[in-house]
């Protein structure tokens, strides 16, 4: 399979391609390659690139015992934040922008045990190098620029770590519809889930910090007719020399009601807080995610909360497409700590459209009215509100997000580009 990928953003566009080769030469190996370039819309010049290359063998059946992954990925870009097509300014009046270079590589080998309860033991080696640099702003004093860097720019970090990971989960699934996709059958893992990952790093081996790290997940999913209830929790801790610690906790809950009278209710909430934040990581809320109706990334901080209630209809057939309606209420906010979070509310409605002949991912058209006065509304009134047209549901089912060699996000809420 081959494809072309194009993205358009206020400051740039990207053009690239990808090639996927499943079942290489009739084996159970899968290959994937992607590469692309970022082009500045003002200058027309390239300002970065991205790409990945991987070969993997997944656990495809209960009787499978071994799997592996070898891969590398990179993203070199200029990170900028915009709201209503205008650059976002820091508290010092400096546009939030910096150069970002992220390189990941490594390999892992997994051994699976059991059938009714699946235990997977994984060993591996990962390289994670993140470099960030901001250009001095000509209209800011050295003191203002230093404060801007401390507030807004992530801290560069390189980590070369061997790791060991243990996962334990059931093998029973619930088949249902209208949760993540729209009117296509989906499967969700039931019962208890647990995972633990341990890893060290040392400056003598090329890392920027001496540390011992752990990532732990715990969760449970209970079926309710053709719906379910799920709770998950996570702790991620890096204890490092020289007080350069990084630690966070997060939790989420999801209730998907059984379908009744052609309707389904979905209630979802997630809380994330980095209580040790040497790396200066932030979550970003608002815009097409949650709370809908506010400007993009209106709420940023080391801690964040987002909750939603959606009432979804089933699908009607319209010229072979599937069409449904959603009404929703969102609440969310961010701050440097949980006590700093100010909640913002919105109400709205939308439609979901699926073309099952070409894609499993639905199209989403939402209108939302931001109810809470203050920053994040443009203009500062509930009406006329904001309209979003994009792919997929507004928020994902909470799942285990263990660190991945190729860089999957490990947070339950949105991260700015890092």
Image (spheres, helix red, strand yellow):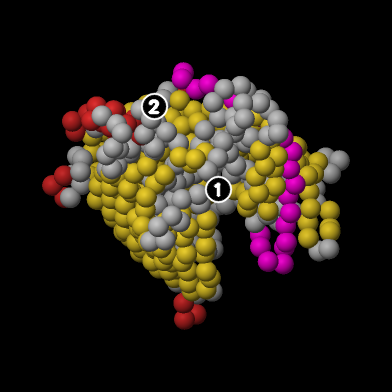
Q: Which of marks 2 and 1 is nearer the N terminus?
A: 2
Split into 4 quadrants, where in the image is the N terminus?
bottom right
Kindly identify which numbered label has been placed on residue 355.
none
Q: Where is 22 relative to 408, above or below? A: below
Q: Nearer the viewer, mark 2 or mark 1?
A: 2
Q: What stretch is highlighted in magenta?
A: 339-360
Looking at this view, is 196 or 394 the one in front? 394
Split into 4 quadrants, where in the image is the C terminus?
top left
Which residue occupies 70% across, 39% down?
Answer: 367
Position of residue 374 measured from the top left corner of the image (x, y, whole percent): 57, 22
Kindly identify which numbered label has been placed on residue 91.
2
Q: Does the magenta stretch include residue 352?
A: yes
Kindly identify which numbered label has been placed on residue 170.
1
Q: Residues within 10 Å of mark 2 (few under 14, many from 20)?
A: few
Kind of element beneath mark 2 = loop
Kind of element beneath mark 1 = strand
Looking at this view, is 320 or 27 the one in front? 320
Which residue occupies 63% across, 43% down?
Answer: 394
**In terms of image quadrants, where is residue 89?**
top left
Q: Where is 367 relative to 347, above or below? A: below
Q: How many numbered badges does the structure rendering display?
A: 2
Locate residue 352 relative to residue 285 in the image: left or right: right
- Furthest residue to the left? 204
- Furthest residue to the right? 261
Which residue occupies 78% across, 60% down?
Answer: 321
Q: Distance of mark 2 from mark 1, alpha carbons?
A: 48 Å
Please indicate, yes or no, whether residue 157 appears anywhere in the rendered image: yes
Please indicate, yes or no, whether residue 109 appears anywhere in the rendered image: no
**In terms of image quadrants, where is residue 289?**
top right
């Amino acid at each position: 399979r081959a494809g072309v990928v194009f993205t358009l953003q206020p400051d740039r566009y990207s053009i690239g391609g990808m090639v996927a080769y499943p079942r290489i030469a009739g084996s159970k190996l899968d290959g994937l390659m992607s590469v692309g370039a970022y082009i500045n819309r003002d200058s027309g010049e390239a300002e970065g690139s991205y790409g990945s290359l991987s070969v993997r063998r997944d656990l495809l059946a209960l009787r499978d015992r071994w799997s592996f992954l070898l891969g590398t990925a990179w993203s070199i870009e200029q990170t900028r934040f915009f709201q209503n097509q205008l650059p976002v300014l820091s508290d010092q009046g400096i546009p939030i922008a910096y150069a970002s270079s992220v390189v990941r590589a490594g390999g892992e080998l997994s051994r699976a045990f059991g059938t009714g309860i699946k235990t997977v033991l994984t060993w591996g080696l990962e390289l994670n190098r993140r470099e960030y640099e901001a250009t001095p702003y000509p209209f800011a004093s050295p003191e203002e620029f230093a404060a801007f860097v401390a507030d807004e720019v992530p801290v560069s970090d390189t980590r070369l770590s061997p790791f060991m990971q243990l996962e334990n989960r059931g093998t029973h699934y619930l088949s249902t519809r209208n949760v993540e996709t729209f009117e296509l059958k989906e499967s969700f893992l039931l019962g208890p889930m647990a995972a633990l990952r341990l890893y060290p790093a040392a400056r003598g081996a090329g890392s920027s910090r001496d540390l011992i790290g752990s990532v732990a997940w715990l969760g449970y999913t209970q079926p309710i007719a053709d719906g379910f209830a799920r709770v998950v929790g996570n702790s991620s801790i890096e204890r490092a020399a020289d007080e350069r610690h990084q630690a966070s906790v997060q939790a989420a809950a999801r209730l998907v009601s059984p379908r009744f009278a052609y309707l389904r209710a979905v209630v979802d909430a997630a809380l994330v807080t980095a209580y040790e934040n040497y790396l200066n990581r932030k979550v970003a809320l608002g815009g097409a995610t949650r709370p809908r109706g506010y400007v993009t990334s209106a709420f940023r901080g080391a801690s964040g909360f987002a909750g939603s209630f959606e009432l979804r209809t089933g699908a009607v057939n319209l010229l072979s497409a599937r069409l449904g309606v959603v009404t929703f209420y969102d609440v969310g906010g961010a701050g440097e700590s949980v006590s700093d979070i100010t909640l913002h509310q919105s109400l709205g409605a939308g439609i979901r459209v699926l073309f099952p002949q070409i894609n499993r991912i639905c199209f989403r058209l939402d209108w939302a009215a931001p109810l809470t006065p203050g920053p994040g509304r443009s203009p500062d009134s509930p009406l006329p509100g904001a309209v979003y047209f994009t792919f997929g549901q507004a928020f994902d089912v909470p799942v285990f997000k263990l660190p991945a060699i190729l860089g999957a996000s490990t947070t339950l809420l949105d991260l700015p580009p890092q």
